[in-house]
Image (cartoon, rainbow, N blue to C red):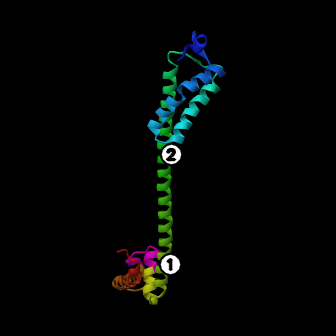
Amino acid sequence: MPDLYADDFRAGMKINEASFLHLYECYWKKLYHLAFKYLGDAFQAEGVVQDVFTSIWQRKSTLVLDPETAENYLVKAVRFRIARKYNDDIRKSRRIEELSVRQSEADNHTEETLFCSFLREEIDRLVTRLPERCRLVYQLSRQEGLNNREIAVNLLISEKTVENQLTKALKVIRKGLGKYQAD
């Protein structure tokens, strides 16, 4: 640093308008190049350097810089801002990715729910087309949860007839849903 402000620096540099402008004029370009080297973006580099000098000005009443280490302080402040920017960018990227995954899962869940609802309706439509006894056996088995023996007792038919009717109902339903099977 030039000796122009040597009196200000003897016991440490208290920030005032003159010392602030001196720091700015001496180090702005160097700090900008450092920030640009890491960020690769002129606008972001300018913003980082501006943030450092804004912070210094806001803390002017309490901040005292040693003239021997003022440059090191400024370089570290710029590096710290860059590191914080990288961390913020990483956090934002992760958050966006997480939201994207959640949205995708929600979309898939909605799609699956709609498809299941559609299949339920299609199965119900196919069941209504079954012959009466076949439909009744299927409904007692699948909707009421009765086993073959209980169905046979309720309908006064043999267990073999229940098996045959269920096989017939499932065959009709599978055939009706065949056009919806995934390749």
Q: In the rendering, which numbered label is found on residue 92? A: 2
Q: Residues within 10 Å of mark 1 (few under 14, many from 20)?
A: few
Separation of marks 1 and 2 at Cα, in angstroms: 43 Å
Circle 1 sits on which residue?
121
Looking at the rendered image, the quarter that the C terminus falls into is bottom left
Instruction: Say which residue appears at 46% left-offset and 76% top-offset.
Output: 119
Give the left or right position of residue 134, taking residue 52 as reference. left
Residue 140 among those drawn in magenta: yes
Q: In the rendering, which numbered label is found on residue 11? A: none
Relative to the observer, which residue lies in front, 123 or 7?
7
Residue 110 among those drawn in magenta: no
Residue 48 to residue 109: above or below: above
Amino acid found under the numbered disc labelled 1: Glu
Instruction: Say which residue appears at 49% left-offset and 83% top-offset.
Output: 125
Residue 111 to residue 50: above or below: below
State the image coordinates of residue 113 (x, y, percent, origin top left).
50, 68
Relative to the observer, which residue lies in front, 153 or 12?
12
Q: Which element carries disc 2, helix, strand or loop?
A: helix
Instruction: Say which residue appears at 61% left-offset and 30% top-offset.
Output: 54
State the image coordinates of residue 76 (x, y, percent, origin top left).
48, 26
Q: Residues within 10 Å of mark 2 (few under 14, many from 20)?
A: few
The residues colored magenta run 139-150
State the image coordinates of residue 142 (x, y, percent, origin top left).
44, 75
Amino acid found under the numbered disc labelled 2: Lys
Query: For the stretch drawn in magenta, what is the main secondary structure?
Result: helix
